[in-house]
Image (cartoon, rainbow, N blue to C red):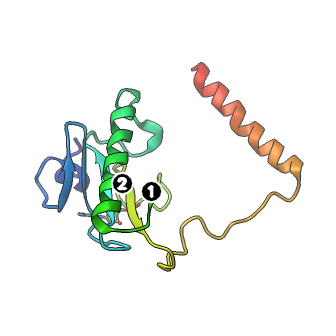
Amino acid sequence: MNPECIFCKIADGREPAHIVFEDEISVAFLDMRPVYHGHTLLIPKQHISTVMEFPGEFIERFFLNLKLVSRAVEEGMGCQGIFNAINNRISQSVPHLHIHILPRNKGDGMRHFLWPRGCYDTIDEAIATAEKIRLSVRRIRER
Ligand code: DGP
């Protein structure tokens, strides 16, 4: 727990929130500034900031909770789909990992996630980019 963190405070009941799900490792609650009604945040109770720090032993349970809450938002809000998003450092206003779970409907007007899109000018540029990431995967796995 980080005593100053607003999401830690929600997780341990020191700050109010509209909680929709809770278990030993995570809490889900309504985002107070929703893109659409039903916009929910799922957080780990442990204070970690980004996906890159996520403890391996909780990943399966946490992802199952993401599946459960995403299904619940979809059914509860009667929407056609779900958008899941995580800001890691850039555009992250609360430095406690949170997964946005947004109800989506065709024609709902959401435009600014994953936009604008570009392209690789050449196949070599794509090959070199993929190789940089592949090398990093290898290095990280060897640590
Ligand atoms: P991001 O920009 O990805 O870090 O999203 C943070 C979200 O957290 C933002 O949509 C607003 C929401 N938020 C910030 N503070 C609080 C709070 O105290 N309570 C609730 N329910 N949501 C919060």
The amino acid type found where label 1 is placed reads Asn
Q: Which mark is residue 134?
A: none
Is disc 1 placed on a helix, strand or loop? strand
Badge 2: few (under 14), some or many (20 or more) residues near its Cα, within 10 Å? Answer: many
Q: Nearer the viewer, mark 2 or mark 1?
A: 2
**Residue denoted by label 1:** 84
Q: Which residue is rendered at x = 22% and y = 52% of the image?
A: 4
The amino acid type found where label 2 is placed reads Ser
Q: Where on the image, by quarter, is ligand 1?
A: bottom left
Q: Quadrant of residue 76?
A: bottom left
Number of numbered callouts drawn: 2
Q: Quadrant of the N terminus?
A: top left
Q: Quadrant of residue 35?
A: bottom left
**Residue denoted by label 2:** 70
Is disc 2 placed on a helix, strand or loop? helix
Badge 1: few (under 14), some or many (20 or more) residues near its Cα, within 10 Å? Answer: few
Q: Position of residue 105 (x, y in %)?
A: 45, 72
Q: Position of residue 85 (x, y in %)?
A: 46, 57
Is mark 2 in CB contact (under 8 Å) with mark 1?
A: yes
- Among numbered discs 2 and 1, the one appearing first in the sequence: 2
**89 vs 138, nearest the viewer:** 138
Q: Which residue is rendered at x = 59% and y = 27% of the image?
A: 140
| Residue 23 sits above or below residue 101 on the image | above
Q: Which residue is rendered at x = 39% and y = 34% of the image?
A: 59
Q: Quadrant of residue 114?
A: bottom right
**2 vs 55, nearest the viewer:** 55
Q: Quadrant of the C terminus?
A: top right
Q: Position of residue 58 (x, y in %)?
A: 34, 31
Q: Position of residue 21 (x, y in %)?
A: 21, 50
Q: CA distance from mark 2 to mark 1?
A: 8 Å
